[in-house]
Image: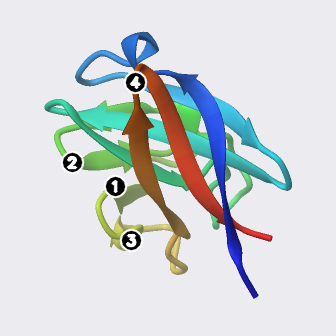
């Protein structure tokens, strides 16, 4: 199995503390800017299927808008429930001003 780098958005579209829902082919991903560092995770909460881009970024945590479950943007791990399953994380690269996410084929 191989991976593909998918261009998802301009780097300039994500300021620190912001996130953006992007389409990476077969995956809906949220890209998060934490203090200038970019992270990419599954866009849908593992608990009640809420779109995480409707939530908020608190430090290095992504907060679900439905029940305020928190995930660590660096690892996808659950920081506080109600979710009990982590999010998948994706490698991020920036080429020129384009954010790319590495997704499985």
* Residue drawn at point x = 33 percent, y = 70 percent: 75
- Is residue 54 in view from this perspective? no
Assess whether mark 3 and mark 1 are in contact (beta carbons under 8 angstroms): no
First-in-chain label (2 vs 3): 2
First-in-chain label (1 vs 4): 1
Residue bearing mark 3: 78
Determine which quarter of the picture holds residue 27.
Answer: bottom right
Q: Cα distance, mark 4 to mark 3?
A: 33 Å
Q: Cα distance, mark 1 to mark 3?
A: 10 Å
Disc 3 crowd, CA 10 A, few/some/many (<14, 14-19, 20+): many
Assess whether mark 1 and mark 2 are in contact (beta carbons under 8 angstroms): yes
For the residues carrying marks 4 and 3, which lies nearer the camera in this image?
4
First-in-chain label (4 vs 3): 3
First-in-chain label (2 vs 1): 2
Residue reaching furthest to the front = 96
The local secondary structure at tag 4 comes to loop
- Which mark, by number, is residue 73? 1
Assess whether mark 3 and mark 4 are in contact (beta carbons under 8 angstroms): no
The local secondary structure at tag 3 comes to strand
* Residue drawn at point x = 37 percent, y = 56 percent: 70
Residue bearing mark 4: 96
Residue bearing mark 2: 60
Position of residue 40 measured from the top left corner of the image (x, y, whole percent):
47, 50
- In which quadrant is the C terminus drawn? bottom right
């Amino acid at each position: 199995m191989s991976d593909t780098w998918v261009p998802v958005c301009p780097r300039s579209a994500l300021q620190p503390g912001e996130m953006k829902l992007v389409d990476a082919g077969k995956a809906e991903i949220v890209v998060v800017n934490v203090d200038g560092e970019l992270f990419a995770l599954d866009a849908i909460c593992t608990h009640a299927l809420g779109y995480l881009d409707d939530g908020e970024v608190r430090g290095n945590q992504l907060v679900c808008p439905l029940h305020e479950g928190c995930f660590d943007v660096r690892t996808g791990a659950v920081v506080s429930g109600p979710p009990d399953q982590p999010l998948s994380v994706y490698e991020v690269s920036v080429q020129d001003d384009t954010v790319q996410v590495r997704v499985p084929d």
